[in-house]
Amino acid sequence: MRQGAVETKGSWRARLIRVLVSVRVTEAFLLLLAVLCVAATVIPQTPYRPGDGLAIPVRAVMSVSLRDVFHSLWFLGASVFLAVSCVACMVFRFSARRTGAVSAVSGRVIPVAGSGTPPVVDSLRKILPPAYRIDARHDRDGLVAVCERGRIRRLAPYAIHGGVVLVVAGALLAFAGFKGTIALTEGGMKSAATLLGGTVMPLGFGVRSEGFSVERYPDGMPREYSAEVSFVKDGRRPVRRVLRVNHPVLVEGILFSLSGFDETHEAVIAVMGPRGARRFTVGEGSVVDVDGVLRVRVVRVEQDMMRMGPCVRLVPVGGDEEDDLWLFGRIERIESVHPGITRSVRRFDPSRYPGYTFVLEGIRPSYITVLGVNRDPGVWLVATGACLFLAGIGLGFLVVHERVTVRIDTAAPAIRTAVVSRTVNGSAVPVDDGLLRVLKEGGGGRS
């Protein structure tokens, strides 16, 4: 009973190994991956859909949806099977090479006299180039001499299969990373990124914008832009880096790239009130606390409002929208063209709020730097796997592995036979007649 259980277990393992190393099964999964890639090209993809708070059935449906092919169970399952198949092939190949005996079943059979190792080896060295490595040994069936050149080519299958395994492993590790963006105002700092799915991911350190510069074409279109960014962690000295398009920087295992910018405007406003004059630099959405009594919100900042120059719209916090103030920077010029306009249109009067006079000193451009944030812990595995895969392809195509095997039967007392075979890159090829003649003449005597 115990013996039968062992045999059943071994049979199950054998069947599993046959499935894993089967070329047809592997081709089927490669075809599935190709079909999925085509589907991802044809079907509009919506990756990075937020899954927080969703029910398990909804997540299960999302995991098999073709709307996000590269994060679906179909693609992941086929990739994992491909990696497991590659590992099984390498193990199977290594085990067969390690335990399998050298044979020359389909070789040429020639008569030889004598069976000593030195005569056979000397004969092989006479005819074969120095690049061949000759290994002669005795086993229970006789003398075996194996001559090889280009043995490094045998590593090609291991390199190719191992490269595929590393690429798949690196792709799976990518799920432990994240991808998102950070929008920084000039001088602003953030310590978290907004992921593409909407989740906020803490970085563990601060990212601060130190400045932004843009060069433009004569028509005003941006030609080149760059941002200076500081990275602050645990109160240590900030690390400054300059980011340009297609020139990312790597900090704490996270890749930061300059993905774009938004141009806004900031206004410089001076306010004369009961407690003296104060100056503020504000942007849209800012709240100006003048003196603790009057608080206004900046609703709009225009560089040229209806061709009347720079303008800022202010609304009292907690007040009526109708009590707004349109503060123009060139109010004297407007008054000269339209006399009495500040008296007839109260919202144009800089002294609209009793006791306070607002002055718009100027408007300057302000930039919001948009950084791409990408953490991919598997990128080095993918790069290593790709290099290993290419190295295996190069070995397979550029290096020729040739093996000449000579087996001499030493059991017969007088006339002995030698079986000679030759393979090139694993395929049997005819044996050179010159080699056979030298073996007949120098293999220990004459036939």
Image (cartoon, rainbow, N blue to C red):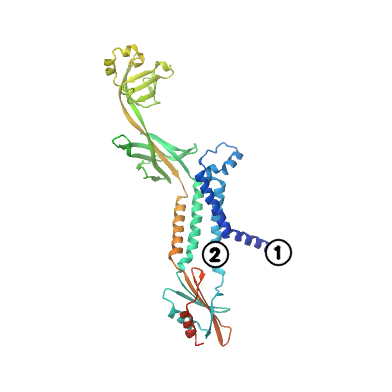
- The image shows a total of numbered marks equal to 2
| Residue type of the residue flagged with mark 1 | Gly
- Please tell me which residue is depicted at 70% across the width and 65% down the height of the picture: 3
Q: Nearer the viewer, residue 364 or 39?
A: 39
Q: Where's residue 324, x and y in %? A: 39, 17
Q: Image height check: is 81 above or below 188?
A: below
| Residue 353 visible in the displayed image | no
Label 2 Cα neighbours within 10 Å, binned few <14 / some 14-19 / many ≥20: some
Q: Nearer the viewer, residue 88 or 357?
A: 88
**SS for callout 2:** helix
| Residue 83 visible in the displayed image | yes
Q: Image height check: is 218 above or below 312?
A: below
Q: CA distance from mark 2 to mark 1?
A: 28 Å
Mark seen at residue 4? 1
Tag 2 residue: 93
Q: Where's residue 267, x and y in %? A: 33, 26
